[in-house]
Amino acid sequence: MRTTSMILAAVALFAASLAALPAHALDVRDLPIARAPEACPHEGPGFTRVVPGGPCMRISGRVRAEAGTPVQARPGAGLDGAARGVVSASGRVAIDTRTQTEYGPARAYIRLGTGH
């Protein structure tokens, strides 16, 4: 119980110190203007350059979801004998980055996925 009281006291002290800080409003006119990404047609369709003079990159992926109608469980399959449905989902994202170096072209490719 003593440890819990010490943690709660530390959190209360931290919250009180944050409350003492002055609040500042954000003026939209002070924000930098973002530039639109430029296309990299020499690398292929979908490649853009986010940073001027930086590497060309393409981010792609897919999402899949399924749902089915409830099917009666076969006798003895479940303890409660309730109806079972089919629900599944999967997804994938791929990041392809290409740039020119003094030694020639360099490429980094990462693909993460789950499910099917």
Image (tube, rainbow, N blue to C red):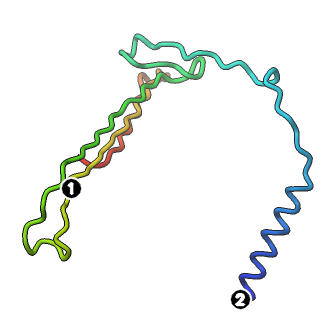
Q: Quadrant of the N terminus?
A: bottom right
**From this viewpoint, which residue is outermost toward the top?**
41
Name the residue nearer the viewer: 7 or 113.
7
Mark 1 secondary-structure assignment = loop
Query: Sequence-wise, which precedes: disc 2 or disc 1?
Result: 2
Q: Quadrant of residue 36?
A: top right
Q: Nearer the viewer, residue 84 or 37?
A: 84
Q: Bin the neighbour count of mark 2 within 10 Å (Cα to Cα): few under 14, some 14-19, many 20 and up.
A: few
Indicate left or right for 71 with 61 as reference: left
From this view, report whether residue 76 is shown above or below residue 113. Answer: below
What label sits on residue 85 in the rendered view?
A: 1
The residue at the far left in this view is 75
| Residue placed furthest toward the bottom | 1
Residue 58: image x %, image y %? 42, 25
Q: Amino acid at mark 2?
A: Met
Q: Amino acid at mark 1?
A: Gly
The answer to which quarter of the image holds residue 7 is bottom right
Please identify, in this view, whether the residue under mark 2 or under mark 1 is nearer the observer: 1
For image coordinates 43% across by 19% down, the residue present is 47
Residues marked 2 and 1 touching at CB (< 8 Å)? no
**Number of residues whose C-alpha sits closer than 10 Å to that of mark 1, classed few (under 14), some (14–19) or many (20 or more):** few
Residue 89 against residue 32 in the figure, above or below? below
Regarding mark 2 in the picture, which secondary structure is present there? Answer: loop
Left or right: 51 in relation to 100: right
Q: Residue at coordinates 24% horizontally, 46% vertically from top-left?
A: 67
Q: Which residue is mark 2?
A: 1
Residue 110 in the image: x percent, y percent? 38, 39
Q: Is residue 21 above or below residue 40?
A: below
Rendering coords of residue 71 (x, y %): 14, 57
**Residue 94: x, y in percent?**
37, 35
Report whether 100 appears left or right of 82: right
Q: Identify the residue at image location x=41%, y=11%.
A: 41
